[in-house]
Amino acid sequence: MKSDSRAPAPLLWVPLLLVLLALGLKWMKLNSDGMSLLPNFSPWMALAFTGTLVFPRGTIPWWAWPLMLVGIDFAAMGGQFLAMGAGHPEVYLMYVLYGVAAWAANQMRGQAGILQTLLGATACSLVFYVVTNVLSWWTMHEYSKSLEGLVQALTTGLPGFPPTWVFLRNSLLSDLGFSALLLIAFNAEAKVRSAPTLRWATVAA
């Protein structure tokens, strides 16, 4: 058996800085009413999926991403976070979905180009939107348990709140935007270090 003599890939500091800034944004949104101008404008799924892809194996494990998001929420909300989970255990589904996205990205490490990464981030945002809104439709008595109620949950939502499609739009904008920033930062730092960059697309062997 041939031993792998390659040195482990170094941690990329510019993408890491963007990750820390995004986690700081999450903490600020939970602690400031002024940070709620755009509902669901948050790059958390991009953190879990694209963050896993751009950091090489051996730097940040895939399971660290959902744990970081849970940790930020707990640090910002404290006992309120635990009370919310006790009263509405379905909220933990969000972190499960983040974990699934990070795990899926981990399987794609070294095999995905820029296009595949952006398509993957889009798919993760869509799955998150559909799963969480179907769960809301099923658990909330305000929705009729019919096809009409399901369509309402996936499009207009409940009266008095922004339409759910607005949340989807903002999620896609933030996830794709932050994914693009991470990819640009990754390739920029890789070029400076004379390391391999991510291609626009990869072709299966």
Image (tube, rainbow, N blue to C red):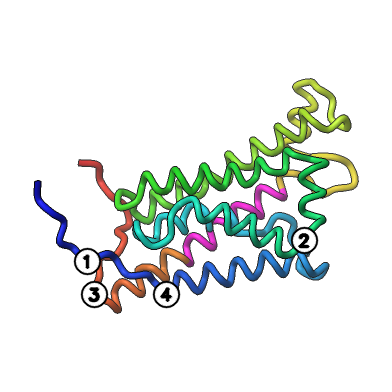
Q: Position of residue 106 (x, y in %)?
A: 40, 48
**Vertical order, 170 against 141 (above or below):** below
Farthest residue to the top: give it.
146
Q: Distance between the residues labelled 4 and 1?
A: 18 Å
Foreground of the two, 22 or 163: 22
Give the residue number, with chain letter if any, for mark 1: 7
Question: Circle 1 sits in a helix, a strand or a loop, which is it?
Answer: loop
Question: Circle 2 sits in a helix, a strand or a loop, which is it?
Answer: helix
Could you classify mark 2 by the number of other residues whose Cα lies within 10 Å: few (under 14), some (14-19), or many (20 or more)? some
Residue in the image at 83% along x and 41% along y: 87
Please tell me which of labels 3 and 2 falls first in the chain. Answer: 2
Give the residue number, with chain letter if any, for mark 4: 13
Q: Where is residue 154 in the image (x, y as percent from the top left)?
A: 72, 36
Q: What stretch is highlighted in magenta?
A: 166-181
- Specify the amino acid type for callout 2: Met
Please tell me which of labels 4 and 1 falls first in the chain. Answer: 1
Q: How far apart are marks 3 and 2 (CA)?
A: 42 Å
Q: Where is residue 158 in the image (x, y as percent from the top left)?
A: 85, 40
Q: How far apart are marks 2 and 4 (CA)?
A: 28 Å
User: Decide: marks 2, 4 in contact (CB < 8 A)?
Assistant: no
Foreground of the two, 80 or 173: 80
- Specify the amino acid type for callout 1: Ala
Q: Distance between the residues labelled 1 and 3?
A: 15 Å
